[in-house]
Image: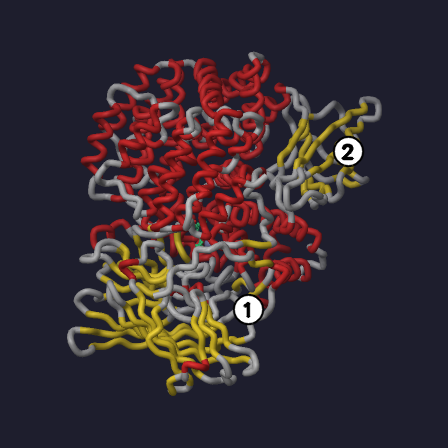
Amino acid sequence: MPARPETPTAPVRLADYTPPAWRVSDVALEFDLGIDSSEVTAHLTLHGDSDVPLRLDGEGLELLSIAVDGAPLHADRWRQSDVSLEVDGMRDGSVLTTRVRLQPAANTALEGLYLSGSRETGFLLTQCEAEGFRHITFFPDRPDVLARYTVTLRADKARFPVLLAGGNPDGAGELAEGRHWARFVDPHPKPSYLFALVAGRLEKIEHDYVTAEGRAVKLVIWSEANAIDSCHYAMDALVRSMRWDEQAYGRNYDLDVFHVVATHDFNMGAMENKGLNIFNAKYLLADPDTTTDDEYKAVEAVVAHEYFHNWSGNRVTCRDWFQLSLKEGLTVFREQQFSADMNSPPLKRIEDVALLRRAQFPEDAGPLAHPVRPAEYREINNFYTATVYEKGAELVRMLAGRLGSEGFRRGMDRYFAENDGRAATLEDFLGALGAANGIDLMPYLAWYGQSGTPRLRARGRYEAEAHRYTLTLSQHTPPSASQPDKHPVPIPVKLALFDRDGAMLPLHLDGRTHGVETVVVLDTAERSFTFEQIPQAPVPSLLRGFSAPVLIECDYAPAELALLLTHDPDGFNRWEAGQQLAARAFDDCRSGNSQALDAWTGALAQLFGKPDLDAALLADLLTPPGEIELAERQEAVDPSQIHALRQTMQRRLGQAIGAVALEQRYRELAASGPLALDAAGKAGRRLQRRVLELLALIAADAAHALAIGQFRSARGMTDRLTALAVLVRHGADGATDALAEFRQRHADNPLAMDKWFAVQAQIPGEPALARVQALEQDPAFTLKNPNRARALLGTFASSNPSGFHRADGAGYRLLAERLAMLDALNPQIAARLATAFNGWQRLEPVRREAARQALTDLADRPGLSRNLSEIVASVLSR
Ligand code: BES
Ligand code: ZN
């Protein structure tokens, strides 16, 4: 078998796109499945120009036979390389048949056909996005080749009783020697990345669904037997997602069956294969004893996301991988809308913006920065990034805001109608949205082509005699290595003006009255907006709802932010004012000032006493920006100092509220009866956690006693894990016992055990490294399982700045060594974990040098995958 090509390859460029020379109208696949060896026969009906050789992608395939229109092909008509098969003299309409052998059990990269679980009890499945299909058979493995698939699976019936592929079932039966077969036909032409199969011993739950259009659909969720009782919540979320897409977007499901399968061995979160979604078990299984509230929300969100792809991604797919945000950004946005509708809009917005700032802003500010539509890549798997996903979703949100909800729906209807069954581009998207509304949206393309987070600067000037307030907005995007000259982008700024009593003022702008909230668009480097009839110097509330993904700079006095934090009727903006004030309070802690710190703690202490405030919102208000976000605002970053200062400011917050008030609120929240999974139940636990965490900073003994009690009498995983985290992070007396008890209780549940590893990887500061090293020796630890590797190493490197960024560089060396090991098993996971090094250039000199050394040593290792070497080289650049 040809070795995997791991030598650096030339980048793929958006500018070089050419349509495929050969297309496939129909593909018939036959699989003879086995764990060590599987055989794949592919019949491709081809269309193209005989003068151009047919070039198919194929990697790691053992070619057994090749024929055209049923006749074996002479050796001088075809050539195989490491990555392709070329055939000369193909005729339009002829059928190419190849037969290849694969080794599923040897596939540790979890791309193509692989084994999940053990050889004895595990099952076979596929993962094809982005370029995995070429590991299954020879094919033009690019998203603009859409074909109709007929898939026949054959396997031993006792070992593989369940046989699934995408599409509608089209027969099944018995074969000789205890084997059986099943066939699936997908009537909707699709790209190869949406192909999937699953074969093995699986249990199911079913639900009969009827679409708004009247189609009866069998919904089936599959998992290994011991987890099937944990699939009901996902089924419920699926049904709600289907109804929501019918109502919000008029989108109906389009096959007779919809299968969903859970696996513990998965590189990503989940995958939208047509008619056969495959999920990382972490995002499908849910039950109160092992699943936290946040994880329930994640299951709901991921089920919805993958379902929504059926239209935004599958029916309308991408022309090439540069257009990835066309499906991912749009689908993240659609999921955000759904989750907001199912839960609470302001809380969902807070979570999404916090994620954007934690994951996307640092990416956009460092050497891994790339536009939402990148200009080039070497390894496409490295471009499933926060920028493509989260910033991409923000861009769709901006467009939706620009059009209003009716205009956006009109535009989306047009986009789906014009592009159904097509492989589309971002221009097609903006074109359809704009045309349906008579608006030119092409200026927004600038956002898609330019990396970096724009800085929006706001200055206000009040003219008392004229009762006039002039707001001057300007924008600037710092240059990056590949884009030294950045251009202005259209920035919609939703705003309101508050008087000093916290009331919103009516807005008179350009001779028109706008109510108390309006949107102005800054589409040049600088512009001023003049508001008339303003009776007193107002406090501006800018970028409401986070109307554009920018960094805002505005010279508020702390008291002005405190006013917004106290009075803004919109929960999101309230939180936003609190975050800005908290960032200033953090600066105070550094510099020994207290004005902003006092304003922040004072305003929150007052809000803490307000009984009508939503508990979950209060919990979020009481949470300052995280250590990663705070580091973004600094040069010469010292993560241990940031951790210490953030603890200090939280301690000051705890003191301002007072131990008595905290403990009293804790007891009220803890006494609220049996586990309720509704919004109020989740909100209460969210606040209970925050209160316990603050209490732990000012009254450690009392807090630890409460935590031990909470751990013992936990109503579910949220209670149990919150308590455990408080004990473990503070190195409390009860921590060791609690960890042992947790482990014993959940030893058989891999998802719970992942949490056991992750909670320990989050111990702050010096002790973290030794704990991680000890846990690597635990019999339950393995690098082979992505969830487990992420739980320990990913959490340590990406979610524990003060633990990972040791001044002695031992954290960096540990990660670099593990990345090299992981790379030999699973390059995608290695590359993803390597992004933890992003931002090393901004560390203080001692850490910076240690990180640079670890990275260059890693880069110098021979035989790194394309995935990992691309990330390491990019991170090291500049
Ligand atoms: N299409 C992706 C899954 C994927 C990504 C497959 C990269 C292969 C390579 C899927 O729709 C997705 O976006 N999954 C996310 C979760 C989602 C809720 C944001 C994931 O897996 O992280
Ligand atoms: Zn997706």
Q: Secondary structure at mark 1?
A: loop
- The picture quadrant where one finds residue 219 is bottom left
Amino acid residing under circle 2: Phe
Work out whether residue 242 can be spotted. no
Q: Residue at 31% x, 41% y: name it.
A: 291
The reply to whether dot 1 and dot 2 touch (C-beta < 8 Å) is: no
Q: Nearer the viewer, mark 1 or mark 2?
A: 1
Categorize mark 1 by other alpha carbons within 10 Å: few (<14), some (14-19), many (20+): many
Nearest to the observer: residue 289 or residue 425 = 425
Residue 624 in picture, x, y percent from top left: 49, 26
Write down the residue under mark 2: 531
Work out whether residue 50 can be spotted. yes
Write down the residue under mark 1: 422
> What's the colour scheme?
secondary structure
- The picture quadrant where one finds residue 71 is bottom left
- The picture quadrant where one finds residue 819 is top left
Q: Secondary structure at mark 2?
A: strand
User: Mark on residue 270?
Assistant: none
Q: Residue at 27% x, 72% y: name it.
A: 32
Quadrant of the snapshot with the N terminus = bottom left
Amino acid residing under circle 1: Arg
Residue 480 in picture, x, y percent from top left: 64, 41
